[in-house]
Image (cartoon, helix red, strand yellow):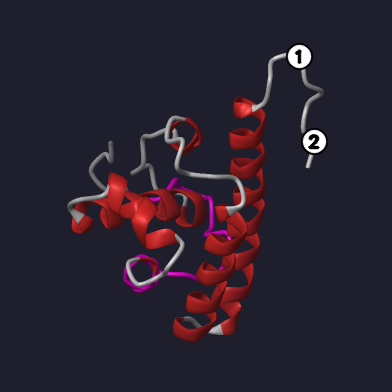
Amino acid sequence: MSKPTSPARPGIPPRFPATAEQIMSQVSAFYARVRQDEALAPVFANHVSDWPPHENKIAAFWRNAILHERCYDGNPQRIHIERPDIRPELFDHWLDLFEEVAHSTLPAETALPWVALARRIGVGMKVGVQSARQPKDAPPILR
C-alpha cells in the first residue's frame, strides 16, 4: 500500500536527474503500452482492474527508488512470486518495453540510468520468482 507522499530524505540527492512528474509520465506511458501488449496485457488484466491506483503505487515505488521519497510501502518481490501467471520469461519482455518507452518519453540523462536501475531490479525479481518456484532440493539460481 502506498503511503502519502513525503519529502525526499534530506541530504540525499536523486539517483539521477528526474522529477516526480517525469516518473508519473513514464509510468503512465509504460502501462498504456502494457495494456496493448500481446504478452503482458492478459497477465496485468488478471491482477489490475483499476489502473490509476496501480500506476500511483508504481510511481511511488520509483519516486522512492530514484528521488528517495518515503512514499512506498510494499513488497513487489512477494507480489510477483504469489502470482503464478507472472512467468520469469516475461521479465525480459517487460524490461525491453520499459526501455523502449523510457527512450521515447524521457531525456537521455534520465532514461539511461533509469533503464539500468530497472534492469538491475528486474534481474533480481526474475531470479526471485524462478527460485521460489523451483523444487526445494534444486541448486540455487544465481543469475
Viewer-proximal residue among 121 and 68: 121
Question: Residue tagged by mark 1?
Answer: 137
Q: Residue at x 26, y 49 (%)?
A: 48
Q: Give coordinates of residue 69: x percent, y percent.
A: 40, 48
Q: Determine which of the numbered discs, if any, sits on residue 142 in the image.
A: 2
Query: Relative to 48, does residue 96 appear above or below in the rendering?
Result: below
* Image-quadrant location for residue 33: bottom left
Three-letter code for the amino acid on which mark 1 is drawn:
Asp
Query: Which quarter of the rendered picture does the C terminus lie within?
Result: top right
Of badges 1 and 2, the one in the foreground is 1
34 relative to 97 in the view: left or right = left
Q: What is the secondary structure assignment of the residue under circle 1?
A: loop
Out of 120 and 6, give the one closest to the viewer. 120
Instruction: Locate residue 89, reporting x and y percent.
Output: 61, 52
- The 10 Å Cα crowd at callout 1, few under 14, some 14 to 19, many 20 or more, is few
Number of the label disc, if any, that sits on residue 55: none
Q: Quadrant of residue 131?
A: top right
- Please tell me how crowded label 2 is: few (under 14), some (14-19), or many (20+) other residues with Cα within 10 Å: few
Residue at coordinates 35% horizontally, 72% vertically from top-left? 36
Q: CA distance from mark 1 to mark 2?
A: 15 Å
114 left or right of 26? Answer: right
In the rendered image of this protein, does residue 74 appear above or below residue 116? above
Q: Residue 109 occupies which quadrant of the picture? A: bottom right
Q: Which residues are magenta?
A: 7-33
> Could you tell me the amino acid type at mark 2?
Leu
- Disc 2 is placed on an element classified as loop
Above/below status of 54 relative to 28? above
